[in-house]
Amino acid sequence: MRRYFNSYLWSMTPAEVNFKWTQLQQRISTDFDTDKPDIKVVLFLIGVQELGQGPQKFSKRQKEELMHIATCRLLSELGFYELEGSDQDGWPHWKLVKAIPSYSLLEQELLMKTLIVSYFEEMDIR
C-alpha cells in the first residue's frame, strides 16, 4: 500500500492537489451541511475515522489528540511515524521513527493537502 501511495502522491502537481482539495472541501461541506472545512477540521474527521469509535462528543484535548492521530497516520505513509498499538480505551499511539524535514509553511500546507486528498482517495471516500 505504501509504495502505491507514495508513487501516486508524488504524481500530482500542486495545481492538481489544490483542485482535488477544493473538491474534497466541497464534498465535506455538502455532506455535513457546513462551511468549507480547513485542514484542521479535515484532520479531526480523519482522526475520528482512524479512532473507529464513531461520532461522539469530544473534549478540546481529545479533539487535539484526534488531529494528532490523523497527522501521524498521514505522515506514516511517508515513513515518519509507525503505529505502536492502541491503549486500553482503543486510542491509537504512534511513534516517530525518522525525523521530519523542516518545511516552509507553504510546503507543509501542500504536503498535508496532498496526504489528505490521497487518504480520502485511498479510503475510497469521495
Image (tube, rainbow, N blue to C red):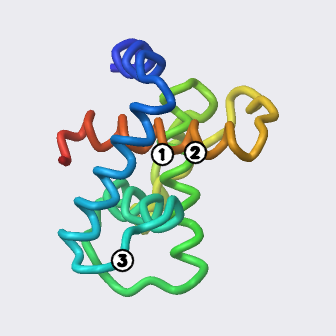
Residue 110: x and y in percent read: 57, 39
For disc 2, the marked residue is: 94
Q: Residues within 10 Å of mark 2 (few under 14, many from 20)?
A: some
**Quadrant containing the N terminus in the rendered view:** top left
Side of 4 relative to 63 (left or right): left
Q: From mark 2 to mark 1, how far is it between C-alphas?
A: 7 Å
For disc 3, the marked residue is: 35
Name the residue at 46% across, 32% down: 15
Classify mark 1: helix, strand or loop: strand
Residue 71: x and y in percent read: 55, 49
Q: From mark 1 to mark 3, how far is it between C-alphas?
A: 34 Å
78 over 105 or under it: above or below: above
Residue 125: x and y in percent read: 19, 47
Tell us which disc is closer to us: 2 or 1: 2
For disc 1, the marked residue is: 85
Q: Which mark is residue 44?
A: none
